[in-house]
């Protein structure tokens, strides 16, 4: 029923990774980090909604989301600092 949340999260994370690996995005790209944040949040939700929540997967993706949020903050802060 809610499998689509996990599938969309997985597709978004893979898209970010493929675009990074193909050189279409770089690790300082806001788009790259936003894709990672969205994918990680969706996988966290999916992991929580399972009949037996997948706690290790949830924790990994929560941390992954927090790293992405921090990275976006750093990118935005640096842009504002130099303008």
Image: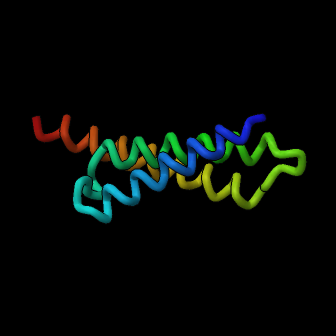
Q: How does the figure colour the protein chain or chains?
A: rainbow
Q: Residue at 56% across / 51% down in the picture?
A: 10
Q: Residue at 65% across / 38% down in the picture?
A: 5
Q: How many marks?
A: 0
Q: Is residue 53 left or right of residue 62?
A: right
Between 5 and 72, the residue placed more toward the observer is 5
Find residue 79 and report its image quarter: top left
Name, please, the residue furthest toward the right.
51
Between 38 and 1, the residue placed more toward the observer is 1
Between 69 and 58, the residue placed more toward the observer is 58
Q: Position of residue 65 (x, y in %)?
A: 53, 47
Q: Quadrant of the C terminus?
A: top left
Q: Position of residue 11 (x, y in %)?
A: 51, 49
Q: Residue at 57% across / 45% down in the picture?
A: 9
Q: Residue at 27% across / 38% down in the picture?
A: 76
Between 65 and 48, the residue placed more toward the observer is 48
Q: Quadrant of the N terminus?
A: top right
Q: Is residue 70 left or right of residue 65?
A: left
Name, please, the residue furthest toward the bottom.
21
Find residue 45 and report its image quarter: top right
Q: Position of residue 23 (x, y in %)?
A: 23, 61
């Amino acid at each position: 029923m809610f499998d689509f949340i996990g599938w969309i999260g997985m597709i978004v994370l893979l898209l970010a990774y493929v675009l990074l690996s193909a050189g279409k995005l770089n690790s300082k790209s806001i788009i790259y980090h936003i894709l990672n944040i969205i994918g990680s949040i969706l996988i966290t939700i999916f992991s929580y909604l399972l009949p037996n929540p997948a706690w290790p997967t949830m924790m990994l993706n929560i941390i992954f989301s927090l790293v992405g949020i921090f990275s976006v903050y750093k990118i935005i802060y640096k842009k504002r600092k130099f303008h």
